[in-house]
Image (cartoon, helix red, strand yellow):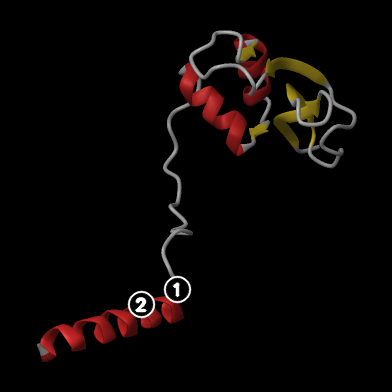
Amino acid sequence: MSMKIRLARGGSKKRPHYAIVASDSRMPRDGRFIEKLGTYNPLLAKDSEERVKMDIERIQYWLGQGAQPTDRVARFLEAAGVKDKAERANMKKAVPGKKAKARADERAAKAAAPAEAE
């Protein structure tokens, strides 16, 4: 059975509240879980102590049993000092593609041509 430490969403529409849970990876996001390990309230200020609460001992137990944290939970664990900081791939989503770069180069060339003529 592959285990995950992940977030289970609760709260009403536009007022999210998450539980940090240990669950079987085959279960739905908000479905059955084995143990509740903490809470996360994204509506609170980032420096608030109440924003992320975790039972560190139980999380370490589940990590020892082979549970894999999701990306967001792994970031919480890194901030708490439980897990080493992982190197993440920068996906470069903000970098324009080949066609967009070509269009930008054409615009720059057109703008530069009248300036050179004078």
Which residue is labeled 1 in the image?
A: 97
- As helix, strand or loop, the secondary structure at mark 2 comes to helix
Residue found farthest to the right: 32
Front: mark 2 or 1: 2
| Residue placed under numbered mark 2 in the picture | 104
Q: Say few, some or many: other residues with alpha carbon within 10 Å of mark 1 (under 14 / 14 to 19 / 20 or more).
A: few
Whole-percent x, y for residue 11 in the image: 82, 23
Q: Is residue 109 shown above or below 93?
A: below
Q: In the visual, does 75 lie left or right of 98?
A: right
Near-viewer residue (45 or 7): 45
Q: In the displayed structure, does residue 14 sit left or right of residue 46?
A: right
- Where 100 sits versus 67, above or below? below
Place residue 85 in its image quadrant: top left
Residue 24 location (% of width, % of height): 81, 34
What residue appears at the point 72 percent right and 33 percent down from the top-left corner? 4
Q: Quadrant of the N terminus?
A: top right
The amino acid type, in three-letter code, at marker 2 is: Ala
Residue at the image point whose x is 44% and y is 28% from the top: 84
Distance between the alpha carbons at the discs numbered 2 and 1: 11 Å
Residue placed at 45% from the left, 81% from the top? 99
- Rendered-image quadrant of the C terminus: bottom left
The answer to which image quadrant residue 17 occupies is top right
Q: Residue furthest bottom?
A: 117
Name the spot of residue 43 as percent of width and height, x first. 64, 21
